[in-house]
Amino acid sequence: MSRVCELTGKRANNGMAVSHSHVRTKKLQQVNLQYRRLWWAEGNRFVNLRVSTKALRTIQKLGLGRFAKELGVDLRRF
């Protein structure tokens, strides 16, 4: 399974690790994903999602239904 946030679509970022001698090597920066069982009030049920920690903070602020609606995600498929 790929490491992608199911709400925001965030995925890994290619970057460079730079040593003290300035030797650059490729590095993959992964998204901090968490499996969460979240309450969806509009659907009156729990939804199991794999979301990034940044998305979790936004869900706490706005609510799951409103955040998913802004992103255009249909929670009925989860």
Image: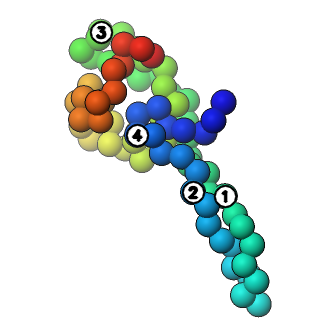
Residue type at numbered disc 4: Thr
Q: Earlier in the sequence, mark 1 or mark 3?
A: 1
Residue type at numbered disc 3: Asn
Identify the element where label 2 is drawn. Answer: strand
In three-dimensional space, the C-alpha distance between marks 2 and 3, rounded to whole angstroms, equals 35 Å
In three-dimensional space, the C-alpha distance between marks 1 and 3, rounded to whole angstroms, equals 38 Å
In the rendered structure, find residue 19 and report the number of the disc placed on it: none
Please identify the quadrant where the N terminus is shown. Answer: top right
Cβ atoms at labels 2 and 1 below 8 Å apart: yes
In the rendered structure, find residue 13 and report the number of the disc placed on it: 2
Give the foreground label among 2 and 3.
2
Across and down, in percent, residue 69 comes to 24, 29
Quick check: 45 above or below 66? above
Residue 21, picture quadrant: bottom right
Residue type at numbered disc 1: Leu
In three-dimensional space, the C-alpha distance between marks 4 and 3, rounded to whole angstroms, equals 22 Å
What crowding class fits label 1: few (fewer than 14 Cα within 10 Å), some (14-19), or many (20 or more)? Answer: few
What crowding class fits label 4: few (fewer than 14 Cα within 10 Å), some (14-19), or many (20 or more)? Answer: some
Q: Earlier in the sequence, mark 4 or mark 1?
A: 4
Residue 62 visible, this orientation: yes
Cβ atoms at labels 1 and 3 below 8 Å apart: no
In three-dimensional space, the C-alpha distance between marks 2 and 1, rounded to whole angstroms, equals 6 Å
In the rendered structure, find residue 28 and report the number of the disc placed on it: 1
Q: In the displayed structure, does residue 60 sit left or right of residue 13?
A: left
Q: Earlier in the sequence, mark 2 or mark 3?
A: 2
In the rendered structure, find residue 44 and report the number of the disc placed on it: 3
Query: Which residue was labeled with disc 4?
Result: 8
